Amino acid sequence: MTRIIAIAAAALVLIGGAVWWQTSQTANSTSFERLGMAEAQSAEAGAEVDTSLVTEMTLGDAEAPVTVIEYASFTCPHCKSFHKDVFPQLKADYIDTGKVHFIYREVYFDRFGLWAGMVARCGGEEKYFGIAEMIYDQQAEWTKGESPADIAENLSKIGRTAGLSGDEIDACLRDEAMALAMIQVFEDTSKADEVNSTPTFIIDGEKYSNMNYADFAETLDGKLPE
């Protein structure tokens, strides 16, 4: 069973140092406000967002014969299961062997999924997939905070375990330009690929839902050159 995307547009709000998520009913009406600060500023809805800030996270040979794009949410239990039960063998058999170029794209069902993505990206491309694996492995633990502040602290602990400093993580979670860019990229790519559930896979342009390893391998083998 998969979860349907519930976010059409969103705004990230920093209030007294806390990060909060708000949804909008109008697509592409993303806005940002910093409240409770002397220099409070706001961006008008529809203002341009610098999506070049968002790096595409990939594994494998960019010239591999097959490209797999995964759309997944760090708060999605089925995505966690895929990354625990299927992805390691997929990586060993297809990505590390040069058969598949793998692209991972984040989906944000909620503010916590966004925060997880921001923490994962805080270590840059070199640490991204390692931190992402930790976030999935500990999904049941870090998502159970009693308050948003608890969730943020749980994610911060994961980042610190991965070698990031508290200051680095705090700066990443406060990076409004990056947050808005991530949201915009999510909206643009998921709309273009007609993604409405996670995990969703785009394999050489064709859309597939969640699969076990055997079905995934059969699909890939059917697309690989003989």
Image: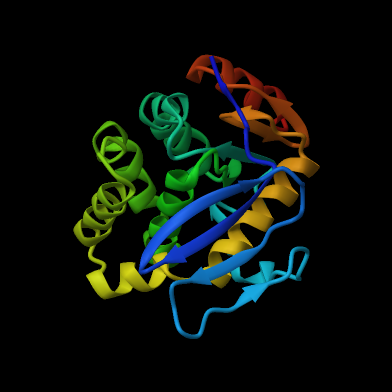
Whether residue 172 appears in this view of the structure is yes
Q: Is residue 192 above or below residue 203?
A: below
Check the image and tell me how it is coloured. rainbow
| Vertical side of 176 occupied by 66: above or below | above
Residue 224, relative to residue 209: is it above or below? below
The relative height of residue 49 versus residue 96 in the rendered view (above or below) is: below
Q: Which image quadrant for residue 136?
A: top left
In what quadrant of the picture does the C terminus appear? Answer: top right
Q: Position of residue 34 (x, y in %)?
A: 51, 71
Kindly identify the residue that appears in the image at 57 percent across and 68 percent down: 33
Locate residue 50: give its quadrant: bottom right
**Can you give x and y, in whole percent of width and height, for residue 59 in the image?**
52, 51
Q: Is residue 45 left or right of residue 95?
A: right
Image coordinates for residue 69, horizontal then vertical, percent: 63, 41
Residue sitting at 54 percent across and 59 percent down? Answer: 12
Which residue: 59% across, 38% down? 70
**Residue 155 or 90: which is nearer the viewer?**
155
Q: Is residue 7 left or right of residue 165?
A: right
Of residues 109 and 210, which is closer to you in this image?
109
Seen in the image, is 222 located left or right of residue 117?
Answer: right
Residue located 38% across and 58% down the image: 119
* In the foreground, 173 or 119: 173
Residue 7, given in percent of the width and then of the height, sits at 63, 40
Can residue 62 be seen by looking at this rendering?
Answer: no
| Left/right of residue 97 with respect to residue 225 in the rendered view | left
Nearest the viewer among 27 and 134 is: 27
